[in-house]
Amino acid sequence: MQSKTIQLNSLFDKWEQTVSEYKGKFVRDGIINENLYQIASTKILFITKEPNNPKEESGDFREWWKNEIKYAFSYRLAEWSYGLLNNFPEYDEVWKEKQTHNAIQQIAFLNIKKSGGGGNSELKRMSEHLKMNFDFLHKQIEIIDPEILILGLSWNKLRDGLFPNIKWEKSGYDILIGKHNKSKVIDYYHPSSRTAPAASYSLLQNIVLSDKFKSL
């Protein structure tokens, strides 16, 4: 059987050829390091909106995050990943560990829109790309096959457009949770939100360790 990375690359090739405006601009994502993902304590997938890439250059998050991470967006994902994979040590201890960067290589990540945009997404534009990409996105999620799926989509309309069949429940922490096939889903903040890093880390900890989330 082909590896998940090979399956994803084949999907991306077809995707770029099918959506004409992506040709030469496609930004790949998916499982950052398949070997590490396969042995991770929890299979995690983050879903956000679009790359912050106004020049609309092609690229690959799997390559960008191989050796380093930059900017608040990536740092939040690394912190959240480290917490999820290590039973949430105290936030002040997270960046003392040399393995925090390694945590982001153990997860999967995807954007709804596969070409670059500016720092602020527009709901109308994102909804158009969701409609174009719906089947491709669900095939990508199927290949990744996560156990926990964390959304950073900002808009309920975008969330419900991507997952129209999820029955959302209250987590007890003002964040909705639900199930998509076998995956537990958290409707969370975008990693670039202005929420204090320690607060978003601790909130995610409370949700994941709650009885309501565990019983999904």
Image: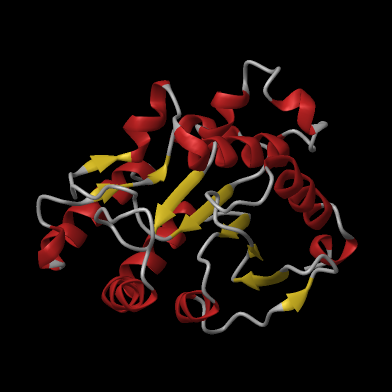
* Residue lying at 45% horizontally and 81% vertically, measured from the top left: 161
Q: Quadrant of residue 208?
A: bottom right
In-image side of 110 versus 54 (left or right): right
Q: Position of residue 155 (x, y in %)?
A: 51, 74
Asked which quadrant contains residue 15, the reply is bottom left
Its colouring scheme is secondary structure
Front residue of this view, candidates 214 and 153: 153
Q: How many marks?
A: 0
Is residue 177 or residue 179 the one in the foreground?
A: 177
Q: Kindly identify the residue that appears in the image at 35 percent across and 42 percent down.
A: 5
Give the answer, above or below, for where 40 lies relative to 129: above
Q: Is residue 156 left or right of residue 202?
A: left
Query: Residue, x 78% and y 27% (percent of image)?
Result: 92
Q: Quadrant of the C terminus?
A: bottom right
Could you tell me residue 91's position as x and y percent? Answer: 77, 33
179 left or right of 128?
right
Residue in the image at 61% along x and 80% along y: 166
Residue 71 on image: x %, y % = 46, 35
Relative image position of residue 36 (x, y in whole percent): 53, 30
Question: In this picture, is 213 found above or below 119?
Answer: below
Residue 6, quarter of picture: top left
